[in-house]
Amino acid sequence: MNRIDRQPLSADEAELDYLDGEYRIRKPGAYVRCAVTGEPIPLEDLRYWNVDLQEPYAGPHAKMLKLGLSKPD
C-alpha cells in the first residue's frame, strides 16, 4: 500500500495480504495484531511482516523472536 492509496479506515482490525515491500488491504481497519506479542499495530506504523507466513510483527525484536534469533525479555 502506498501513502496515496490510503482509504478512511474503521476502528476495527484490518485483514491484509502481505507482499514484498507493501501490503494489500482485504478488509479495511485501523490496525493488525502482532503475530508474536498480540499487541495492536496501527497500519501507519506497520513496518515488519513475513510474506511467506503472512504475519505482521510489532517491530524488529518481535520478528527476531519469531525467527528464534533472540531470547524473550
Image (spheres, grey):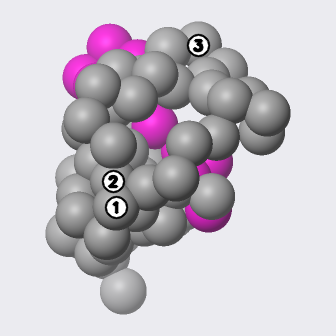
Residue situated in front as seen by the camera: 6 or 71: 6
Q: Mark 3 = which residue?
A: 20
For the point 33% across and 31% down, the residue is: 16
Residue 62: x %, y % from top left: 41, 61
Numbered circles on residues, count? 3
Q: Nearer the viewer, mark 3 or mark 2?
A: 2
For the point 51% across and 25% down, the residue is: 23
Q: Amino acid at mark 1?
A: Ser
* Element carrying mark 3: loop
Left or right: 63 as drawn, with respect to 47: left
Q: Mark 1 = which residue?
A: 10
Q: Nearer the viewer, mark 3 or mark 1?
A: 1
Looking at marks 3 and 2 on the same chain, the residue that comes earlier in the sequence is marked by 3
Specify few, some or many for label 3: CA neighbours under 10 Å numbering under 14, 14-19, or 20 or more.
few
Q: Is residue 51 magenta?
A: yes
Q: Residue 59 lies in what quarter of the image?
A: bottom right
Look at the image and tell me whether residue 9 can be seen. Answer: yes
Specify few, some or many for label 2: CA neighbours under 10 Å numbering under 14, 14-19, or 20 or more.
some
Q: Amino acid at mark 2?
A: Gly
Q: Is residue 49 magenta?
A: yes
Alpha carbon separation for disc pair 3 and 1: 25 Å
Q: Amino acid at mark 3?
A: Asp
